[in-house]
Image (spheres, rainbow, N blue to C red):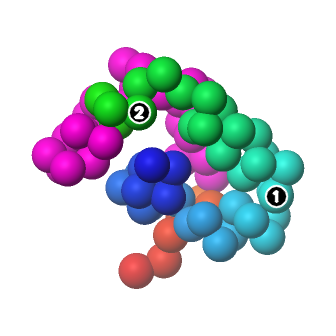
Amino acid sequence: ELPCLLEALRISIRALAEKDPLLLNDLRRNCAACEHKRECDDDIAAGTLVPSYQRYCLNVQALDALQHDDSYTAKP
């Protein structure tokens, strides 16, 4: 689910892995422990992940911070 969410938020997983691998590991760990996988998977399938993830995602604060940091923005 995390790679789908990062892509939807236009956060480069490659940049994150290079610049802050510990944060990426924390994001992965939170995602693995999440109790909302079904809801997340449903949102991925429906294309509603971006407007919905903030209701249940354990990584919301870190992801919001990453979205405001241009050095992690995925390049088209």
Real-space Cα distance between discs 2 and 1? 23 Å
Q: Main secondary structure of the magenta part?
A: helix
Image point (70%, 39%), residue name: 29
Q: Which percent across, then down, holds residue 43?
A: 24, 39
Front tag of 2 and 1: 2
Relative side of 19 to 40, left or right: right
* Quadrant holding the C terminus: bottom left
* Quadrant of residue 71 within the rendered picture: bottom right
Label total for image: 2
Q: Residue at x 51, y 50 (%)?
A: 2
Q: Which residue is tagged 2? A: 37
Q: Which residues are magenta?
A: 41-69
Residue shown at 48% from the left, 22% from the top: 35
Of residues 73 and 12, the one drawn nearer to the viewer in this rendering: 12
Disc 2 secondary structure class = helix
Identify the mark nearer the N-term, 2 or 1. Answer: 1
